[in-house]
Every structure is written in structure tokens, then in C-alpha cells.
Image (cartoon, rainbow, N blue to C red):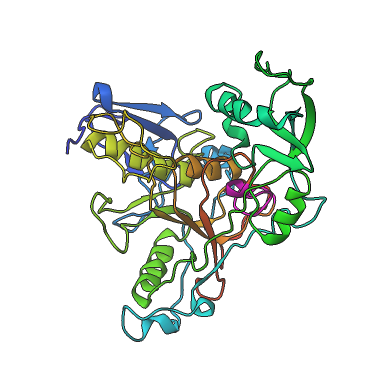
């Protein structure tokens, strides 16, 4: 480590910045140039001490920093004031603190409730559809050449991979072509009528009810969720989660070292707090800060994230080469994030792009939350990752003093 002495003082002797819960100076670290950039967050009064914000996880008892009273009155509240002194009382430990570490905790005894999205596309009104081009093939002898042409043409579009390409109604066969604003070109050596638009489902069928509804529009692939894919939690892992949630109080985002460490998994924890006011930066939410911590740590240490299994078969470039495999650059693969408040839409999308495994939060944000509040980002159509969401039960971690205005992003 390097300690920058002689910087950050309003006097000529040279000293370090002191800490303040309401600092008047923010800083950013420029690792590439070995620099620390300091900037005032507001006007500085004469003879006022310059202070920075260390973090909420202090190793000493903070004392009041006496600055000009007028300056304190001018400071703007960013919505998080008063949360750094929440007193967390002692209480009886839950049942999973008893017994063997390996015993499975019943679902009802877990300290959190899993977020269950509403049934998807279970009625005719909720089935999502898209317009696609199709063409009738009147001659049975043309079906083989048409299939061959589809396999080798650009018309074989992946956005229709959840649908069967041929629909047979009596003697007539209809080929599904592609989704586009203009009709696609057809093979010149096969006599075909003009293509036309049909309404087809935009996703696979997850339930038998959904399959019936979607197949009525166009034959759809059935891909139900596997039984038992909800992960069981042991007493030991539930205790690990309990301690992780205590670590995030009063306001923080925390990614602990995994309970079961596998090869290549990170072996340390990361915690970050909301610093929008202290850093004078609107994007410094706690979740964004902890993701950036991991990115900076990985860049400095040369670590790679745990590989995520590729969704498709390996390509020639994956075998016997040094090129990165799918998932190498994802920051949160197999990781569980604990946070006090439900992440906002921005943070939820950042977690999705980082390939987080699970998000556990204490307080919902009904007007701004992206994990079931105003919307649920991982269940939106078109996103390429799903992560689990758990709401911590209020009677197992104390909520006193943690309430926020629902219009404030967490």
C-alpha cells in the first residue's frame, strides 16, 4: 500500500484528511496515473477544515467535525441522513442456528422469501406475440428443397428458434421465415406464392397452459422449468446469509465470499455504501459502487471471474485457443448480493449484465425498485440473463430507522 502524506490540508504543515459524515471534499482514484483527484462538493468557508468520507465501516468512534455552522445548514440532504447510527438490538437467534451445519432448512424457516413472478402468459390476453413472415408450400415435393434452403440462407433467423419452422394444416404446409419489416427473398428454383405476415408467440412455452395458447397461434417449443431447481439451503449457509445481511446495515451493498468456495471463485468479500452526496456523483449507488469495487480489484490483481457455462455448443474458436471463453468477463457469476434496499432499475440492470446469481434485500422500493417494485428487470422480455430475488423477512433483521421515501432510488 502507499499512503499519500502531505496532501489534503488547508494548512501549510501537511496532513491527512479527517473523516466526516457530511464531507466537503470528494475524491477519485486514478490508478493508471498513480493520482488521487480531490474536488470540493460545495463552497468552502474561510478556515474550514477539509474532510472526506472514509466509509460507514469505521474502525474508530467518529466525533463531530466542527465546521462553520452556516456551511452545515447549506449542505443538501441526499436522502440517506440519519441512517449511519441505527442501533441494532440483540434478539433470539432463529432455528437454523441450531443443529448440524449440513441440515437442510425448510423453506418456511429460511430468513427470506423468494420472489415469485406472476404466472407468465397463462391467458390469451397475456401471451406476447410478434409478426413474422411465412409462406405456403403447396407442393409436397418442394418441402425438402425448402428445408435445405432455409438451413443455408440468412432467413434462418435465431429470433424464431423457439418455434417450429413448419406448420401442417391438412395438405398444406406453411414455412415460417423471419421477423423483418420487409418480406424476405425466396428461392428462385421453387415455385412459391407471395409471403405474408402471421402472428406468432415471441417466447417458448413454460407451462402446459401456455403451450396450448401459443400452439393455437403457431407450433411452439415446450420448455418447462425443471423440477427441484430451487436451491436448498443448509443451516450453515443460512447462518452465512444472516451474518451477511447484518453486515449491510444500515445502508450498503455486500457481496460476501461464497459459502462454498469453488475453484476460481473469489475468496474475499466486497462492501460498498451509497456515496452520491459525498462523491457528488448521481450514479454512486451502493450496488454500483460494489460492482465497481470488484471490477477494480480484478483489474489490479489480474483475476478472472468464474466462467459461466456457454448457452450454445462451443465454436471452433473456443477449442485449443487462448481466446476468452463465454462468461470470462462477467463480474458476479455465481455470486449472491445482499443489500438493505431493493436495487433501483439502473442497479438491477447492472446486476443483470454482471450475471449475478441472486439478490437478497431487506426493504422494498415500490416506486423505484427494479427487483419487483415498479418492475422486475430479470423477468422482462428480451433480457439475456435471469437471477433469483429474495426479500428478507422483516422480523429477522431489524428495520428501525431504515425507512426511506419510496421515491428515492436505492
Asked if 1 appears above or below 204 in the picture, the reply is above
The quadrant of the image that shows the N terminus is top left
Given the current orientation, which residue lies at the most extreme bottom position? Answer: 99
396 on left or right of 65 = right
Residue at the location (65% across, 17% down)?
A: 187
Give the quadrant of residue 67.
top left
Give the quadrant of residue 62.
bottom left
Q: Position of residue 216 (x, y in %)?
A: 78, 49
Given the current orientation, which residue lies at the most extreme top position? Answer: 188
Given the current orientation, which residue lies at the most extreme right position? Answer: 125
Tally of marks: 0
Front residue (pair 257, 5): 257
Front residue (pair 185, 400): 185
Q: Position of residue 225 (x, y in %)?
A: 56, 59
Q: Is residue 200 visible?
A: yes
Q: Which residues are magenta?
A: 367-379
131 on left or right of 94 = right
Does the magenta run of residues contain 369?
yes
Residue at the location (61% across, 24% down)?
A: 155
Front residue (pair 259, 325): 325
Q: Is residue 83 visible?
A: no
Give the quadrant of residue 170.
top right
Q: Position of residue 405 (x, y in %)?
A: 66, 53
Does the magenta run of residues contain 407?
no
Q: Position of residue 266 (x, y in %)?
A: 27, 50
Q: Main secondary structure of the magenta part?
A: loop
Amino acid at each position: 500500500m502507499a499512503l499519500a502524506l502531505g496532501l489534503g490540508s488547508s494548512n501549510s504543515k501537511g496532513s491527512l484528511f479527517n473523516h466526516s459524515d457530511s464531507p466537503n471534499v470528494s475524491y477519485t482514484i486514478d490508478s493508471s496515473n498513480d493520482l488521487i483527484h480531490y474536488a470540493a462538493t460545495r463552497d468552502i468557508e474561510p478556515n474550514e477544515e477539509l474532510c472526506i468520507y472514509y466509509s460507514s465501516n469505521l474502525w474508530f468512534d467518529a466525533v463531530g467535525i466542527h465546521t462553520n455552522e452556516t456551511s452545515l445548514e447549506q449542505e443538501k440532504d441526499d436522502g440517506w441522513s440519519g441512517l449511519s447510527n441505527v442501533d441494532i438490538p440483540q434478539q433470539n437467534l432463529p432455528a437454523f442456528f441450531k443443529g448440524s451445519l449440513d441440515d437442510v432448512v425448510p423453506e418456511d424457516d429460511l430468513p427470506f422469501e423468494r420472489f415469485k413472478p406472476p404466472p407468465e402468459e397463462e391467458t390469451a390476453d397475456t401471451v406476447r406475440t410478434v409478426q413474422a413472415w411465412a409462406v405456403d408450400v403447396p407442393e409436397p415435393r418442394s418441402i425438402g428443397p425448402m428445408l435445405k434452403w432455409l438451413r443455408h440462407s440468412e432467413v434462418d433467423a435465431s429470433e424464431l428458434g423457439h418455434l417450429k419452422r413448419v406448420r401442417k394444416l391438412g395438405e398444406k404446409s406453411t414455412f415460417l421465415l423471419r421477423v423483418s419489416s420487409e418480406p424476405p427473398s425466396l428461392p428462385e428454383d421453387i415455385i412459391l406464392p407471395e409471403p405474408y405476415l402471421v402472428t406468432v408467440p415471441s417466447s417458448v412455452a413454460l407451462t402446459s397452459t401456455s403451450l396450448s395458447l401459443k400452439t393455437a397461434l403457431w407450433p411452439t417449443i415446450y420448455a418447462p422449468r425443471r423440477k427441484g431447481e430451487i436451491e436448498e439451503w443448509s443451516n450453515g449457509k443460512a447462518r452465512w446469509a444472516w451474518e451477511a445481511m447484518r453486515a449491510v446495515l444500515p445502508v450498503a451493498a455486500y457481496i460476501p465470499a461464497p459459502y462454498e468456495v469453488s475453484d476460481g471463485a473469489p475468496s474475499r468479500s466486497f462492501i460498498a455504501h451509497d456515496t452520491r452526496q459525498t462523491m457528488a456523483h448521481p450514479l454512486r449507488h451502493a450496488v454500483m459502487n460494489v460492482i465497481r469495487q470488484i471490477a477494480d480489484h480484478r483489474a489490479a490483481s489480474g483475476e478472472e471471474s468464474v466462467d459461466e457455462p456457454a448457452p450454445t455448443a462451443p465454436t471452433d474458436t473456443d477449442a485449443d485457443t487462448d481466446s476468452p471463453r463465454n462468461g470470462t468477463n462477467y463480474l458476479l457469476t455465481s455470486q449472491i448480493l445482499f443489500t438493505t434496499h431493493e436495487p433501483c432499475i439502473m442497479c438491477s440492470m447492472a446486476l443483470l449484465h454482471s450475471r449475478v446469481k441472486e439478490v437478497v434485500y431487506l426493504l422494498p422500493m415500490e416506486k423505484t425498485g427494479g427487483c419487483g417494485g415498479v418492475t422486475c428487470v430479470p423477468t422482462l422480455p428480451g433480457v439475456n440473463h435471469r437471477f433469483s430475488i429474495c426479500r428478507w423477512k422483516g422480523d429477522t433483521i431489524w428495520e428501525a430507522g431504515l425507512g426511506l421515501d419510496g421515491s428515492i432510488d436505492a
